[in-house]
Image (cartoon, grey):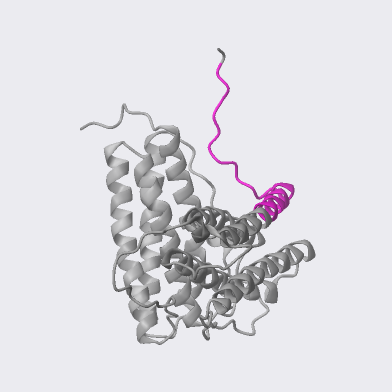
Amino acid sequence: MAHHNINLTAPEISALWTTYMQESASLCFLKHFMVHMEDEEIAPLVKEAMQLSASNLETVKRFLEGENYPVPDGFSDADVDLSAPPLYTDLYALSYVYRTSQLTLVSVSTLITNVARTDLLAFFIQVQQKVTGLYKMSVDLMLSKGIYDRPPKMTYPDSVHYVENNSYLTGWFGERRPLNSYELGEAFFIIERNYIGILLLKGFLQCMKDKEIKNYLIRAKKLAEKQVDVFNLLLKKEGHLGTIPVSLEVTDSEVCPFSEKLIMFMITASTGAAISLIGRSLSLSMRRDVGAHYLLIMKDIMLFTEDGTQLMIRRGWFEQPPQSEIKPL
């Protein structure tokens, strides 16, 4: 089937633009990890992730050029200093691939449902398949190194049960039921992704010289720590141990390998993804008090993300997403 005469739809343009921005940013981090990599088990994983990002970038670039659509500036080697000392350990590089592959699987699943042109659909399905393999490799490696923190376990029921009254939804007053499997899982994963984010922020804070950006990163770290505290306390009240941070470390380097523009993009992009994930958690939470936690955190994150976007606009760093034009009636 010929595709050259089928113009891209707005969601298809968004899918390509978003993929280019995210992959170009991630590639900078992967290059930094790779140039300092010493662990012979982690190195092949990071190398494969780096090659996949580079390949995706080239494919998206060809799509856009074929449509005479401007290729985003995104990020490049100018945004990463490969001569700078390592800011993170090899174990954090493994955690980074694990986390970014998780986020990519979530986002690319949505992108697949938003595109219809067969060449784009084939591309994003291929991306999904390759990232699935990358995610499996990262999980297997984390398990073998003993750094994968498993979600809470629960007893198996002896039969099927039906909810008999509205007390199942109670959260603020009266006797609370135990968290169900959905609520337990979502609480665990919000803690996990914020632990990984806190470590990323520790590295940024260690090397950041710009006062305004440093203050913003401090806010980001406090926001992540708040989420960890809220949901760890929730798990402990339910008789679970909560989650314990694993030994994924930041080095003592104070030389920043990443541009301030790249750092701000990573933080605002991550918090933007968090809003979507918290929305999913909220939709799965049936106890009112748990849902309230998600609503309050979502409000905080939305305000924080807007402040970051405004900072980037003031600095001339906010690359405008694909924009439509108002058509006369």
Residue 63 drawn in magenta: no
> Whole-percent x and y of residue 29?
51, 67
Rendering coords of residue 242 (x, y %): 53, 79
Question: Residue 156: where, in percent of width, then height?
Answer: 33, 75
Magenta extent = 302-327
Which residue corresponds to the image point at 54% horizontal and 83% vertical from the top-left?
A: 244
Query: What x and y, as percent, mark residue 62?
Result: 37, 44
- How many numbered circles are shown? 0
Specify the quadrant that holds the C terminus. top right
The answer to whether residue 323 is magenta is: yes
Q: Can residue 275 be seen in this view?
A: yes
Q: Quadrant of residue 37 in the image?
A: bottom left
Q: Is residue 41 visible?
A: no
Location of residue 323 with respect to 279 vertically, above or below: above
Q: Is the N terminus in the top left, top right, bottom left or bottom right quadrant?
A: top left
Residue at image point 30% right, 61% down: 130
Q: Residue furthest top?
A: 329
Vertical relation: 9 (above or below) 137: above
- 243 vs 307, left or right, is left
Q: Please give the name of the residue rendered at 62% of the width and 55% of the height, measured from the top-left corner.
A: 295
The quarter of the picture where residue 115 lies is top left
Q: Which residue lies furthest to the front in this view?
A: 164
Looking at the image, the residue that sits furthest to the left is: 1
Q: In this view, does 137 lie to the left or right of 150?
A: left
Between 22 and 196, the residue placed more toward the observer is 196
